[in-house]
Amino acid sequence: MLRILTLLSFVFAGLPAVVTAQEKPVYDQVVEILASERGTVRRWAYPPKLTVIHDGDPYRDQINGMVDMVNAQVPGFPGIGAVEFFDLSQFNRRLAGNTQFRMPAADYDGVAGSIVRATFAGEQADQDLNVTGSIFIFLTGLEDGITLGALTQSTKRLSRQFAEGGDMRCYFNVMSLNDELRAGFIFLNMDDALTPVAECLYEEFMQTLGLLNDSQGSSVFTFDNTGTVRENREPDFQLLRALYSQDVTPGDEAHKVADVFLNMQQPRLVGAVAQP
């Protein structure tokens, strides 16, 4: 059994055949990526609405393509309910003190589950601009990004690195209730010419779907905290398919999803594990 588990840690269909001695076994990487602070998994139970708040290029084609790819590749995922783009330039007042993000207790706009309502306050009440969403992508300058991070309660260690202009030019935050994801916020620093927009959009979006953490130095998954472009993203989608399989429910232990992920590989591993 030990030999089989060892082989399974190193040989996966579509995954690199060799994992360095310094790298964690793939099974451990899966657990690390999926586990919340309680060791449980979190996922969406209803189709989240994606709202892009931008000040400049909205990256429509890229974002719509990313959504289509997830919907097609992960049959168990409830799907993105809608995609909306909100041009921040139409709001001509400073954000600080004039913007609110609220998650009503009741359903909003006929969407099952909680949805966040953002209000950009105008000079008078009838000039308020309202937008709703479950996952917000903020494509803004650094100043607005910091303000929106505070307004959405997304202030944590990564936001500090984001503000300091270090390697983390993008980050995400999620909120959940009983391990069901209820809100997600993605921040990209569009003031920084070095921000890898395509890679940031993909990685942070996938993480708001329940791939909660990075596995530092992973040669298998995109979620390694480096921004490295990976040509083979099939392992990422295999992981998402395992999370949204019918055998998994929100609140399950991360190890359960790792087992599901492992079982997805087994039909192609029979010959490998059977060798003496």
Image (cartoon, helix red, strand yellow):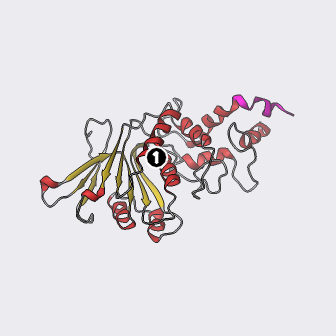
Above or below: residue 161 compared with residue 118: below
Q: Is residue 51 left or right of residue 157?
A: left
Stretch in magenta = 267-276
Q: Secondary structure at mark 1?
A: helix
Residue at image position (60%, 43%) is: 233
Q: Quadrant of the N terminus?
A: top right
Residue at image position (48%, 69%) is: 165
Residue 197 placement (x, y as % from top left): 49, 56
Q: Is residue 200 left or right of residue 130?
A: right
Q: Amino acid at mark 1?
A: Gln
Residue 100 placement (x, y as % from top left): 26, 57
In the foreground, 173 or 190: 190
Q: Is residue 217 left or right of residue 105?
A: right
Residue that carries the numbered disc 1 in the rendered image: 62
Q: Is residue 15 left or right of residue 255?
A: right
Residue 105 placement (x, y as % from top left): 27, 44
Type of secondary structure dominating the magenta stretch: helix
In the image, residue 48 lies in the stretch drawn in magenta? no
Q: Quadrant of residue 12?
A: top right
Residue 104 placement (x, y as % from top left): 26, 46
Residue at image position (60%, 46%) is: 31
Residue at image position (79%, 39%) is: 3
Above or below: residue 139 compared with residue 11: below
Q: Quadrant of residue 160?
A: bottom left
Q: Is residue 227 visible?
A: yes
Above or below: residue 5 compared with residue 37: above
